Image (cartoon, rainbow, N blue to C red):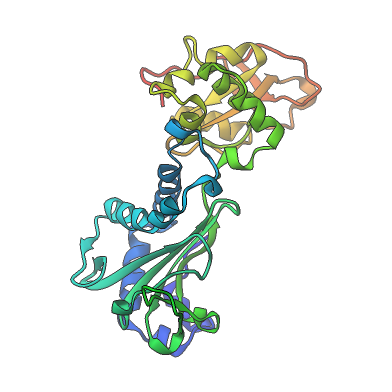
Amino acid sequence: MLPIDINALQNISLPEEVIHDAELRAVHAELIRRDPEGSRFAAVLRDTIDQLLNGETTGRYDWKSLFKTEKTHAGTLVEINLQREFGFEDGLSMDYRITGIDVDCKYSQLFGGWMLPPEAMGHLCLLVWADDYKSRWSAGLFRVHDDWLNHGGNRDSKLTVKAEHRNKILWLWRDADLPENVLLHMDPTDRAAVFAPKSGQQRINELFRRAQQRRIGRNVVRTVAQQKDYMKRVRGNGGARSALRPEGILIMGDYDSHRDVARNLGLAPPREGEFVSVRVVAATSSRRELPQASLDGRPWVVASADDPLEMAPRLPIHTSLP
């Protein structure tokens, strides 16, 4: 999902109040400059949800398993973690100061559910939404005007944006991809099989066996292992890499050389802090048209369900492991 081009606003159906808001445009341009693809923003949201779930200690992976107080705390954590990631200055009266302009930050897991305090009236708000079930997120800027708000009767006197005035939000990123919560989106049978073993190592082995060709973040590994040395469970020399190699399964980390292997096999390469597993077989003349990776001096392709098990080649060696 690409950000909205501020230079093309005249060609977008936006109200005049948005197009001609100089402060809104300035903050929009600055945020896009800092994060052109929204990848940093998306990573903060993924990490914040994972921080709330605290899988290493609790084994949780589902937003619905959070206590009400934890869900309420999500907005504060998003605000803090965005400031930490981007180094925003403290605002004079709002959360942040961006290009000399005060900006409040509001997060909601329900789209449109942003609760705006009365003191934000007239200010810019950074409205953030993320849904782990849809694997989507959005962020946009909104100038708080009384006429554009619902006046509810809640105890905090907080206000929400009227549905008919959501067109006043200048989106930075809209319905962008949120890094997948693999455990949440796994087939229930596979997920049960992952969590069934008592051994953390066996659970990690089962994870990479059953969640092939999907990006698996470190927090997923941490949640499944539930051990302080969770990264050791992925590595060779006794970890999943060596345990699954006889089954033909490669586990690629976020090294450039591993990413190249994934690309050459036609897979989405792991991003920072991620892994991708896949079963491979040696390429034959009948499979020349398939994406191939050269390892151990031979070409390899992604195995089909009918291919017999074959010892996987070794991945490029590194002195440290992701």
Closest to the observer: 307 or 208?
208
Image spot of residue 156 (x, y percent): 36, 73
Q: Residue at x 46, y 26 (%)?
A: 226
The total number of labels drawn is 0
Q: Quadrant of the C terminus?
A: top left
Looking at the image, the residue that sits furthest to the left is 92
Between 190 and 313, the residue placed more toward the observer is 190
Is residue 257 or residue 59 the one in the foreground?
59
Asked whether, in this view, residue 97 is left or right of residue 174, the answer is left
- In this orientation, does residue 289 appear? yes
Specify whether 168 is left or right of 300: left
- Furthest toward the front, the residue is 155
Above or below, 109 against 197 in this view is: below
- Residue found 42% across the figure and 32% down from its top: 57
Query: Can you see residue 278?
Result: no
Left or right: 113 with respect to 44? right
Percent x, y of residue 239? 50, 15
> x and y percent of residue 308 in the render?
77, 15
Q: Relative to 298, say whether 102 is above or below.
A: below
Image coordinates for residue 100, horizontal then vertical, percent: 20, 72
Report which quarter residue 318 is drawn in.
Answer: top left
Above or below 11: residue 205: above
